[in-house]
Amino acid sequence: MIFDGHAYCFPDVRGDLGFKTPEAQRIHVQKSIANHQIQPWRARDHSPGSTAPLLDLEHWPSNESVVDANFRPTSHGRYEWTIDGEDYIKQYFPPSIADMSYPAQNLIAEMDYANVSGALLHRNPYLGIGNSFITDCVRQFPERLYGIAHVPEWRVAEEPEESAAEVTKAIGDGLSGLQFLTSQIHLYGKDPDWQGDRYSKFWDVFAGLGVPVFFSLNVNEPKREPRADHYFAELARLMRWMERYPDVNVVLTHGFTWGLFSEDEMIRLPEKVWEPFENPRLSLQLLFAIALGGKWEYPLPQAVPVFEECVQRIGADRIMWGTDMPIVTRHWTYQQNIDFVENHCAFLSPDERDLVMGGTTRKLLGLE
């Protein structure tokens, strides 16, 4: 049975996403979209645009760095803004996301068509904070949809007890783990040492909940050069965290930061990236299309050798397939995400393919 280890559902992003004020929401989303790698264009003639004018880096990472540019989510997957009288567009979601939402029914319809038995719903703050929407999605489709809890990472150091209580409630309400995006801490200039003492009250409570944590170690923020050094620092924090909490199952989401290590039609991974996987409780989630589908064409033969290396290094029983649906359909259809593994990765044995395409994720969630 195919099980998608990384998918999304989200409410209308033009509405209330759970932030304390509309201004706090606008600031967060504008910071996030400004730092996203998708190329925007000028509305008038479709010439390449830039998100650089959305931020004043002299004031980064304070909220004063956010430039007033009438930044807004509009329709059909677009975020738009206006600079010097010119409108610019970034196609963050695919154009099919006409009303800027993706309810559970839409994902289930795609899953039914592609014969995907289940999916794990991931989180991102600019798709909404709070856990009630995801909990409701899971309740609508039990045994098809599973969800991960989230807590605003930028608040954890200052509010560890409240943050821990929020996650505890979400797990009690039926969610299956926690997603923690370290980039969100850097977005606010908070204490970056998310495995340090200021976070320990939060992590001590979480470690007792008996569910996995999904770490996203994105370093796509300004003033973080060289990016590779920052990424290796995050991997080092991950290793220290796992040493402190040896009984917790951990997943590194999205694979590695492929763009750091891809050039000349190849992906070359440095030895450092494998060091965390000496811990047998760490698994790797692979999403090639969302990161590389805009760089290289389907069926992405450049990714096959590194996929094989991942299986050889850590084993198929610690690798899980995911898609980033529906956002990935900027590049590939749902079926192409499946066909990439099933038809273009001949190095996988049938047993390895079954593990990657769902067995590993189902075991992690206690479904087998």
Image: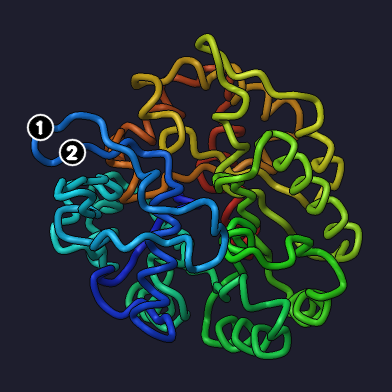
Q: Residues within 10 Å of mark 2 (few under 14, many from 20)?
A: some
Give the numbered dot on residue 45. 1
Element carrying mark 2: strand
Q: Residue furthest right?
A: 243
Residue 144 visible somewhere in the drawing: no
Q: Amino acid at mark 2?
A: Arg
Across and down, in percent, residue 338 comes to: 38, 35
Between 138 and 143, the residue placed more toward the observer is 138
- Does residue 4 sit above or below 47 in this rendering? below
Across and down, in percent, residue 5 comes to: 50, 52
Left or right of 263 on screen, residue 109 = left
Residue contact between numbered discs 1 and 2, judged by CB atoms under 8 Å: yes
Between 319 and 351, the residue placed more toward the observer is 319
Give the numbered dot on residue 42. 2
* Distance Cα–Cα, label 1 vs label 2: 6 Å
Across and down, in percent, residue 144 comes to: 39, 65
Q: Residue furthest left?
A: 44
Write the residue at 47% across / 80% down.
131
Across and down, in percent, residue 164 comes to: 68, 84
- Does residue 15 sit above or below 344 in this rendering? below
Residue 193 visible somewhere in the drawing: yes
- Does residue 172 sit above or below 253 in this rendering? below
